Amino acid sequence: MDLSWAVSATAVTVLVIVIVLMGLVLWSVRTHRDPDLHIQCDVGIDTLMESLAGLTLGTTVAGNSVEVLENGKFWDVLEERIGMAKKSIHYETFLWKEGKLGKRMAKAFAERAKEGVKVRIMLDANGSGGIGKSEVATMEKAGVNVHFFHRKVLRNIGVLNDRTHRKMLIIDGKEAFVGGHCVVDEWMGDAEDGKHYGDVSVRLRGPIVHSVQGAFSENWAGSTGELFAGPEVFPPLKPTGEVEMHVVYAKPENSAPAVKILHHTAICLARKRIWIQNPYFIPEPDAIDAFGEAVKRGVEVHVLMPSTSGSDNPMVQHAGHRNYEKLLRNGVRLWEYPHTLLHQKVMTIDGVYSVVGSCNFDDRSFETNDEITVGIMGADTAERLDKVFEKYMKRAEEIKLEEWVKRGFWHRVKDHAAYSIHWLL
């Protein structure tokens, strides 16, 4: 009996040691990919396109055009353009749920596949677990190649927390769509009520489409082993406008992901104003300090996000609440929209540089998820995106410091509890 007890105690001790060591390994990995970022530069962001692209492991691409698409109108344009595809359609998204929109998109993809168009679709296994079986069957029966990123199987046990949060569509290698829209019925309206969400995506044409195609290829090749090439997917592209852009998506092994570097760098380079629209805003301490330094430089910092009543995940908003007081004391102006979920992931700097994509302003997007964001230099695009901000700000509620510090005890408890697991949300 004594020997049996000793063996059991030893086994428990070994198990505890293994768990502790695994925890240290995970902590070490996160620490190495989460440096405290800082930058000093005396030049305005309007002259730093090459720097922004280079720091984020990309390159500046000239000769493009961009169209901003809002809310449910996005799907009308998307469906029309899918119907015009001749050679190839590549689509990657995080969230697809069974419903009217899901059936509509499945039908659109299936119809092109029946006509001989090569259709490849990458869906995140976690986010798109609710896709209708009939929707998948409709596409696969027509010849669409549907693949789920990191399915819940034993061989993926080490990467189940790694998700593709990217939302992009590339048609014939000639035009691309990037943004925040999800294949869920709530994205079909015009943000008119709590059952219809707001969002922003952009339609891109010009040489920049090659960069977006490359981003799709990364996860497709990594998951399926298939490499695609030729004019059907990478055709020669002539200039379609005068807009300079760069695409950000890389996750280097020994540094912070490129999307995090981009957001932090842009904040540090701002000289006039920073306007952020993001549904999940949980900045890290170094980002909060960067906002404070920006305000000291005379930069106007505004952040627009849903309130707990407008959010699809109130716990995330509570996690963000934990640092509101420090942000407000630093001079950041915070606006909450209570009427519905505003899902757009947009940042404009000094009225000349814009960031649009799939990236939330939180640890999961900056440290773990696969994301895609487009950096766009041009006052016209920034003005168009700022008008979206202004439209919703009229019905938003500004958070005031003197009122915020008086919030109730249970509100504070929920804020701190949610923040304790914010990197998992």
Image (cartoon, rainbow, N blue to C red):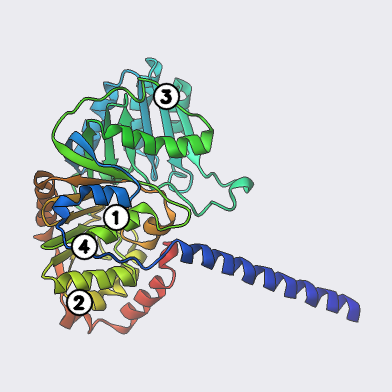
Q: Residues within 10 Å of mark 1 (few under 14, many from 20)?
A: some
The residues tagged by marks 3 and 2 sit, at their Cα atoms, a distance apart of: 50 Å
Q: Judge whether residue 192 can be spotted in this image.
A: no
| Cβ atoms at labels 1 and 2 below 8 Å apart | no
The mark that comes first in sequence, 2 or 4, is 4
- The answer to whether 294 is drawn above or below residue 179 in the figure is below
Please tell me whether mark 2 sits on a helix, a strand or a loop: loop
Q: In the rendered image, which quarter is residue 242 located in?
A: top left
Read off the residue under disc 3: 229
| Amino acid at circle 1 | Leu
- The answer to whether 204 is drawn above or below residue 356 in the figure is above
| Cβ atoms at labels 3 and 2 below 8 Å apart | no
- The answer to whether 298 is drawn above or below residue 348 in the figure is below
Please tell me whether mark 4 sits on a helix, a strand or a loop: loop
Read off the residue under disc 1: 262
Q: Residues within 10 Å of mark 2 (few under 14, many from 20)?
A: some
The mark that comes first in sequence, 3 or 1, is 3
x, y percentage for residue 364? 40, 59
| Amino acid at circle 3 | Ala
Q: Nearer the viewer, mark 4 or mark 1?
A: 4
> In the image, which disc is placed on residue 41?
4
Q: Residues within 10 Å of mark 4 (few under 14, many from 20)?
A: few
The residues tagged by marks 4 and 1 sit, at their Cα atoms, a distance apart of: 15 Å
The answer to whether 261 appears left or right of 44 in the picture is: right
